[in-house]
Image (cartoon, rainbow, N blue to C red):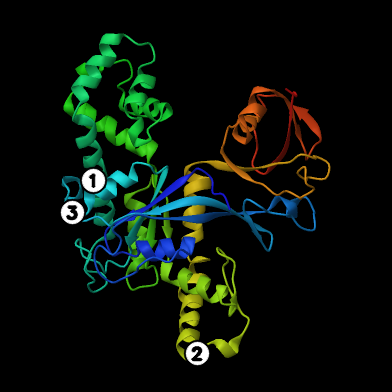
Amino acid sequence: MEASDILIGVVGKTNVGKSTFFAAATEVTVEIGNRPFVTIEPNIGVGYVRKRCVHVELGLEKCDASNSLCLKGWRMIPVRMMDVAGLVPGAHMGRGLGNRFLDDLRRADVILLIVDASGSTSPEGVPVKPGTYDPVEEVEFVIREFDEWLYRNISKDWSKVARTIDSSQVLDVPGALAQRLSGFSIRKEHVVRALEETGLEGKKLTNWTEEELRKFIVAVRRASKPMVIVANKIDLPGAEENLQRLRERFPGIPVVPASAASELLLRRLARQGIIEYVPGDSDFQVKDPSRLDGKTRKLLGLVRERVLKKYGGTGVQEAINTAVLGVLKMIAVYPVDDPNKFTDKNGRVLPDVLLVPRGTTARELAYRIHTDLGETFLYAINARTKQRVGESYVLQDNDVIKIVAAKR
């Protein structure tokens, strides 16, 4: 199954449940331990964005999902996820596994910042009594380490970059600057947004002060590496109060309450056929009570009462959806060959679904499907309305689209 080209970075302080979250989201077997630096090499896996499948809305009996899954009418659209080594204070200076962590992170499009909402993990990743440490400080420290790492890397040859761009008198300064920063997956639109936010557009790069460069780097990090805070261990004492504090302290960043351990338990039992559970559901059903021992039955009761009923889910699926659909503003589009039957050329019903940025046009979708389709694009057909639309038609969420192109 092919995942989209979106890459979600799963990051945070060491030993806060990152690997548990990653394992729950991707069902990839990773080493999970109650000690620092369990994760050394980044783990790569596939998570899923959950959306109501358009076949339900269209009144079709079923779909033939091929590049995704369809579970009880929920389309599970694959995205890439990466779990990297945990951070400790001083990571940007190379302490712990910091430099390796941050080098891996440069490829991410969006970041899930996992924090211990219960405050039961020390800055060094050592388990302590809940409420001992402040998750607000945890978020601040992770962001600070990332910003300092980015500053150290960009400032190393900033004078040379600034002189080169200024002396060449290029008209597209943001484009030239983005080209220099492309190794950090920073694009032109990120640079434009950062320049506007800091008021530095139009000012020669060689005239920037160190403070202005720092402000630009923070702004371009926010634009190119947006974050979702995942308040993990939400079922432990003190976590609910800290959840509110996190939301008050970081009003511009979505905060999602979560219990990764609960999600991991539910998925494993569902995979074994003991319970019925679709990731993101607000409850589960026991299918085979005879296979539940007393300890697992008790755990399921706690998950239901302390997590599912209270928060409407474990938060793992909500965190992924918030990152992709909310922060990155992606929409789902279903390309088809037959707009009347909603099928591909092999007669499969709605087999494919693509995640594309909001604002994507019909021609841009054609290029996404295949370069030749984009180059020979004639028009598209909105399969819902059966109307022709032109190349500049802006796609809407859950559009079903037929691309019509000239034959070569």
What residue is disc 2 on?
Answer: 293
Q: CA distance from mark 3 to mark 2?
A: 42 Å
Give residue 236's quadrant in the image.
bottom left
Badge 1: residue crowd in 10 Å (few <14, some 14–19, many ≥20): some
Q: Is residue 315 something one can see in this rendering? A: no
> Which label sits on residue 144?
1
Give residue 405's quadrant in the image.
top right
Q: Amino acid at mark 2?
A: Asp
Q: Residue at x 28, y 59 (%)?
A: 135
Label 2 SS = loop
Q: Earlier in the sequence, mark 3 or mark 1?
A: 3
**Residue 159 vs residue 246: left or right?**
left
Give residue 241's quadrant in the image.
bottom left
Residue furthest right in the image? 340
Q: Amino acid at mark 3?
A: Pro
> Which label sits on residue 264?
none
Location of residue 98 with respect to 116 vertically, above or below: above
**Residue 342 vs residue 243: left or right?**
right
Q: CA distance from mark 2 to mark 1?
A: 45 Å
> Which label sits on residue 89?
3
